Image (spheres, coloured by chain):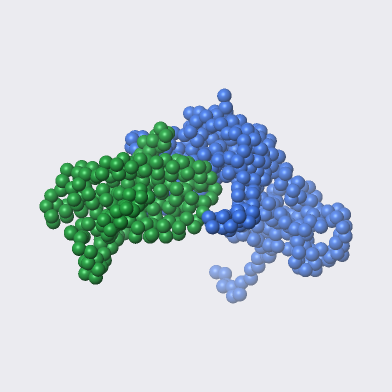
Chain colours: A blue, B green
Amino acid sequence: MYIIEVSNLGKRYRIFYEKNSLVKTFFAWTKGGRIYEDIWALRGLSFKVEKGETIGVIGRNGSGKTTLLKLLAGVTTPESGTMRIDGLASSLLELGTGFQEELTGRENIFLNGGILGMKRKEINRKLADIIDFAEIGKFIDSPMRTYSSGMWMRLGFSLAINANFEILLIDEVLAVGDISFQKKCFEKFNQLKQKGVTILFVSHNLEKVKDACNRTIWLDRGVCKAFDATDKVIKMYLDSIVRETGVSIQENAVEVDSASFLKKKWGSREAEILDVYFTDREGRKREQFDTDESLAVNINYLAKNEIKKPTFGFGIYKKEGQHICGPNTKAYNFVINSINGKGRVSFVFERLQLLEGEYFVSASIYDTDICCPYDHHEKVYKFSVASNKIEEQYGLLKPAGRWNHESIQSKPAH
Amino acid sequence: MLRLLFVIIRYWDLIIALAVKDLKVRYKSAFLGFLWAILTPLFLAVIFFIVFTKIIPMGIDRYPIFLLCALFPWNFMQVSLSMGTVSIVTSGNLIKKVYFPREVIPISVVFSNAYNLVLSFLILILAIVLSCGGIKPPILLLPFIVICQIVFTLGLLFIFSGLHTYYRDVKYMVEIFTLGWFYLTPIFYPIDLIPISFRKIYMFLNPMAIFVDFYRGVMLYGAWPNFFNFMYIVSVSIAMYFVGLFIFKKYEPLFADVV
């Protein structure tokens, strides 16, 4: 017995060239002209969900995720296909949608509870729980325009989860709110899951989807690309990004939101950075170094065609984002006449001056004038520096220099 | 049909909550509150009083009360229609995100205005009692006539608000339509001015004329409504309601896509 059964679901949006009017429609109709364009937001979507499952929905912007939730919530109707929902589905598309800022929190609970289908009596019974979970306290009788956005959202969430839905539809709502409240929400989700509530969770945050969902639907331009175990689907999704954009993604890339990850690498890719790694004096690859040790930054590249006088460079950043240095071949008057095929460019720190901490490294290949990037990897690599001595150190660097002492006027010894 | 009744009962709490919100938001910053709601009909009454007693005397007895008996219910309908026609569009934010039967929105608009109508009638009845002594038993029918007019207004509003969501020029058509309707209804003139040969068909075509006739009858003249007209207006109101709801429901599924 499935709680949601969707088969061959399709949703068409009619985009009017201009705001629709009765007069215009009439004239267009008499002339037989067309004043709109059809766009399919979803097409041929079929899936089944069992009671108590938590299903992730992923996909790029405009892939139909929100349309799917709207259809399931009954906000809009499908153009084709069938949809069977065995239970009450929430409309948790956005929290606190119906709140009126002139009304108090309490009045809004009654108004929005009603919108979510609750009766006055039911709300009265749950009022204390709702206010309590939202952590609104004495502000509950102040107009909502005095609320912070956090309070606004907490009240919306609290109301929605208290509304007794068998199916919760969640659209990116947990992107806001502080960490502790997010944690509380996830705890609440787990409780609801145990109670047998089915959850559909739309998010760009792949990490959260991975945590929360057993199975995941991947939508792409309105079509379901995959519906399977979450790990599998996320891997396929990331692979497809690699194929389409040519960007390689490392294992740990799942930690970052796929959209922001894409922004980490850019360039024309006539020459590519294959790998960046760090070696010590003996040429061994390492990721951890000590202050004063020797460190070499190595950039392996592949040039598809001959490129004349490229500029190689890299940058070192503190974990917190502070830019420490950014040497490039041009600034050091180091000329590479041309590259073609594979090769390696390296820069050696004879004595590493950095103090203890984690460091991110960007690497890039530009044209001669450092104007057009062939390939740029922004803070994709990292190494750390440990201090093997117990001496106290301040600041970022242990500068290369030496101490000197001479006395100007010595007192005669007694 | 039972299902439609079910919606009103099932969502009664929400309809009332929305109507109360509407009144609260409307009057939150206005010191005079409810007075603003009856200011328009009162102001119109003053103008008509000056025009039709001093400039073109019509010689109507107790003319201010004669006017208000018609202006209050007219104002109720006109404000309901102008606010209600755009109500689905102005609640777009809600409609795009939450499902609930959409007719709840126009119903709540009519209810919040009906609250004003009831208050203004209470004041008017008080004025009638104080000024010219006494009301007669037919006034017992007043609540029933008000309910009839609410049902009639709802029917019209369902059509207008449903259409306006798709075609944004409906709002302007409604404005022109109500303006013309105002002058074609015996509000500032008595129904006797309509030629007798023509009067039956006129009242048949303009139910508002019958409503106004009834309001004046039960409040001002203490006369029982004409039975035939009464049955006619009840059936017209109910028919209007269901025709309106039918059209509204036909358009409803795609509201979220067009608002």
A384 and A191: which is toward the camera: A191
In the picture, residue A355 is in which quadrant? Answer: bottom right
How many numbered circles does the render carry? 0
For the question of whether residue A331 can be seen, the reply is yes
Q: Position of residue B231 (x, y in %)?
A: 31, 40
Residue at the top extreme, as displayed: A1
When asked about the image quadrant of residue A370, the answer is bottom right
Quadrant in the picture for residue A205: top right
- Residue at 20 percent across and 63 percent down: it is B59
Q: Residue at x 13, y 49 (%)?
A: B134
Residue depicted at x 43% and y 56%: B174
The quadrant of the picture occupied by the N terminus of chain A is top right
A388 lies above or below A325: above
Apparent side of residue A277 relative to residue A391 in the rendered image (left or right): right
Residue pushed farthest front? B197
Q: Note whether residue A156 is visible.
A: no
Residue sitting nearer the eye, A386 or B180: B180
User: Which of A237 and B155 lies nearest the eye of the viewer?
Assistant: B155
In the drawing, does residue A203 fall left or right of residue A293?
left
The residue that appears at 33% across and 56% down in the rendered structure is B185
Taking depth in this image into account, of B195 and A349 the one nearest to the observer is B195
Horizontal relation, residue B189 to residue A13: left or right: left
Task: State the image coordinates of residue A292 (x, y, percent, origin top left).
Answer: 70, 56
Q: Residue A291, percent across and down?
A: 68, 54
* Residue B197 place in picture, x, y as percent: 32, 53
